[in-house]
Image: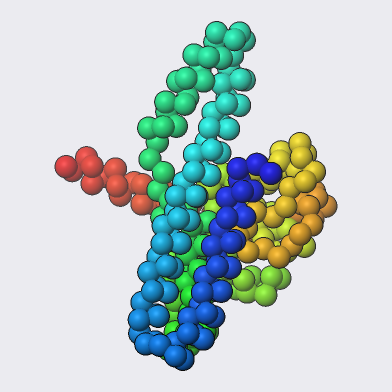
Amino acid sequence: MDINQHVDAALTTLVDNTKFFRELADVVSEFRNGGEIQKLLEESTQKRVEQAENLIKMKSKHQSLQQAMQLAQSESATIEEFEGNWKERCEAVDKKRINVGNMGEFKNFKRSVQAAAASYGSAEDTGQAANGTADHDDDLIIEGIEETGGEIFSLYDPWSKALMKNPVRNTVCGHIYDRDSVMPLIKSNIGIRCPVLGCANKSYIHPGHLIEDAKVREKVRQQMAVEAEVDATSEEEEDDD
């Protein structure tokens, strides 16, 4: 098991632990101050979110270092060249700021753990979850895909964390990946499972499971236009300063 799988397993465990403590809190609150128990649950949930943030940051940096290693190897003809290129690319990775809060994986985890904490909570909390009024970011997710029962998906690839350019859907579980990320992985390793947090699919990903998704591609195109507009606005503001 590589570091990515270890992190994914740890994130799943954090969600499962939250569900367990939520159930335990409901039982204990029958005999003790319910407000006190709720406060402890909220504090522990926040700590799990912070732990997840650190785990995902570590995973993202590991992936960046892997990519840097591959680039350094492809650019180098000798050991000496590789050492120089590797050092330079490592330094670039270390300087790069990782904004975990904007990553689809972190947002999905946060929603999952908050839902787990509220799964046995007040009627008000449950009603908000059922009506879809919980906090979410429309610019990072899409919903209402008929083929997958209206599930919500990130527009960002679960491996590269970049906005997908060639989205494909796993017909076994319905989750979306970037073809440029998933194909090299499953070609070099037949033991790759769906990396989306909480996915119940235990089958290894096979090329035959992947199909193009025109609806997701259109959503990606729209998101690219939005991000391009935001970048242009930011550049104009910097020029004004």
Q: Percent from the top left, x then y, of residue 207?
A: 80, 48
x, y percent for residue 70? 61, 26
Q: Is residue 115 visible?
A: no
Q: Please, is residue 122 above or below residue 112 in the view? A: below
Counting labels gives: 0
Q: Quadrant of residue 97?
A: top left
| Residue closest to the eye, 143 or 101 | 101
* Vertical relation: 18 (above or below) 87: below
Residue 194 lies, with reference to residue 42, above or below; the image says above
Q: Position of residue 125 (x, y in %)?
A: 44, 84
Q: Farthest right residue?
A: 208
Identity of the residue drawn at 63% across and 64% down: 198
Residue drawn 74% across the image and 62% down it? 201
Residue 8 lies, in percent from the top left, at: 60, 53
Comparing 10 with 237, the one in front is 10
- Classify the position of the C terminus by image quarter: top left
Q: Residue at x 41, y 57 (%)?
A: 50
Pick the front one: 93 or 28: 28
Q: Residue furthest left?
A: 241
Q: Is residue 190 visible?
A: yes
Q: Report the colour scheme.
A: rainbow
Q: Name the image quarter holding the N terminus.
A: top right
Q: Is residue 26 above or below residue 180?
A: below
Q: Quadrant of residue 146?
A: bottom right
The residue positioned farthest toward the front in the image shown: 31
**Residue at image location 22% in from the left, 40% down from the top:** 239
